[in-house]
Amino acid sequence: MEMTKLPQMCWIVVDGLPKWLVDRQLSKNPTKFPTLARLMRTDQIARLLPVSPNCQTPPSLCSLFSGAGPGTHGLTGFDVPDANGPLATSNAFAAFQSDVPMIWDHYAKAGLSVSLCHIPFVDAHSLGEALVSHSYGFVPPTVAPFSIDISDGEGAHRVADLGLQVMTQRHPDGGVWIDVSGPSGSAPQKLHLKSGEWAPITIVSGAPTLACLCETDDGVQVHVLGSYSFTPTGQAPDQVGERFPFVAGGLAKVFRSGGFGRPLIDGGDGRAERVLFRGVSELSKRFWAEAVVAVAAQKADFILAYQPAYDLLFHEILGLVDPENAHSTPARALLADALLCDALAEIDCGLAAVVSAAGGRPCVMCSDHGMKPVDTILCPNVLLKDWGYLTTRAGQIDPDQSVAYFHPAETGAVWFAKTAKGDAPEAILDRLTQAFAEYTGRPCGWFATDVRPNAHDHFAQHRFFAPGVGQTLKAYLDGPAVRPSRKTADHATFTEDASLHGVVAALNHRATLPKCVAAQDVAQVFTREVHDVAH
């Protein structure tokens, strides 16, 4: 990425926001989205083309920030194959060791200052005094999520792992009082929880999180999300964290397990999805607030902020509005559409808040990828095992005896032994696609690519399986080769699917955006267009 024009700029990344969802909602009710509707009217929204061969979040963000594709920076998924072994995987954020410079490195080299809100891949030491502030706390949580069953009524409950004593008492106005006594030195918490609503609570000192009371067919439970605790670089104290907790996981897992009530796809009435939406909405406030605070401070030439919260909601309900999706019914689509409308309205409001805080400084935004509706999981390893190409030992893939397998990192890569005799890789892949097409009635495919990071000496992994419409991939070894998906939307391989297209926008200035921008070209387009407008 050639970076010769480096203007002052604020850049917001909204994880997982698909272009088709924006188009759908704006066509139905543009007045609810004044910011996005204005951008659409003035032709300031373009289509983002996701990275290939896999557009999961780490390779997408890395391509956005570096201007390089996965073949250069080496990330091909949320997890990546590890060079330590043919089955080994590593989390892509932790595994990243590329010497490819990021956009903030170019700013620092030019003597300009940067502020980075929840941004991975940052070498703070190399940025030196150019780094005004940096937050990134996606590490093992300080407090793990937990749930307490209070179906038996009032009483005492102990959370042994955390050393907590939780007293519950019915509140006369509905809901419950919960009284939490933590380890020595932590302040006791007393909180009134109303059914289906989220409230902030601090379980361990310095680690605020969110709690929710849910009354379901299976009883009454209090769900407490986990918490990250960290000190952002260049920010003391963490003024945003004092108001908005940095929540660690739990939402999607509890939702899918029925902890918020029966999901729509299991015959629920929408209450579980509303609880999920409210949780995502509360979670999102942390990221909006950090962006607005950083932008309003006017201390950095370049500000980059990440908003990951809504991706959690999209995974669970986005496919319900697609009439071709097996999970969709008219009633489910109506409920999901209303929640998606509210979510997009919050995004619209968040973008407006950033623009207002910028005080005229150019602001841009994009997503990292889109999201495709899914209802079906394809399991290539089940067929490869049945056909004798994949051998197991002690319930795991035996790489020494296997001819081919879909790698456990689930990037889409199918690995083939370099010295194997018999059927060619192309013939095996053709057989897979034909079998899955016969099972599902939907075509799928495969493609070759030059992306070959972290390959093992015994295997080649430059062929990727491409799931079709409504399909995603898993590396399961046993059970059905085709099974229903609990998620209704996903993003992974086969980036030619238009539902995986994201958005690119100039928020508060007129720019000449191309109709389509590849993810690895976004930084170049933003810096060029903002520079040209400023001059």
Image: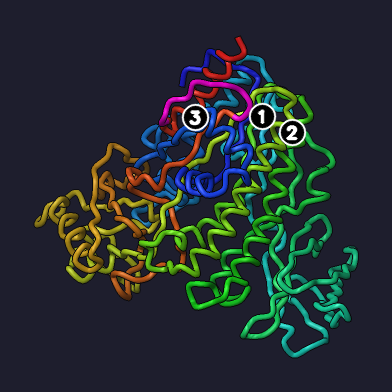
Can residue 401 be seen? no
Tell me which numbered mark, 1 or 2, is placed earlier along the sequence: 2
Circle 3: residue type: Ser
Q: Is residue 382 above or below residue 518?
A: below
Location of mark 2 (residue): 294
Task: Determine which of the numbered discs, if any, sits on residue 66 in the image.
Answer: 3
The stretch drawn in magenta includes residue 493: no
Q: CA distance from mark 1 to mark 2?
A: 7 Å
Where is residue 140 shown, x and y percent of the image?
64, 56
| Rendered residue at 66%/58% (across/down) | 248
| Rendered residue at 90%/68% (across/down) | 188
Quadrant housing residue 68? top left
Quadrant housing residue 355? top right
Q: Residue furthest bottom?
A: 152
Location of mark 1 (residue): 303
Where is residue 441 shown, x and y percent of the image?
23, 65
- Categorize mark 3 by other alpha carbons within 10 Å: few (<14), some (14-19), many (20+): many
Circle 2: residue type: Ala
Of 295 and 86, which appears nearest the observer? Answer: 295
- Whether residues under marks 1 and 2 lie with C-beta atoms below 8 angstroms apart, the answer is yes
Where is residue 331 shown, x and y percent of the image?
49, 70
Which quadrant does the C terminus fall into?
top right
Q: Is residue 14 above or below residue 389?
A: above
Where is residue 270 shown, x and y percent of the image?
58, 71
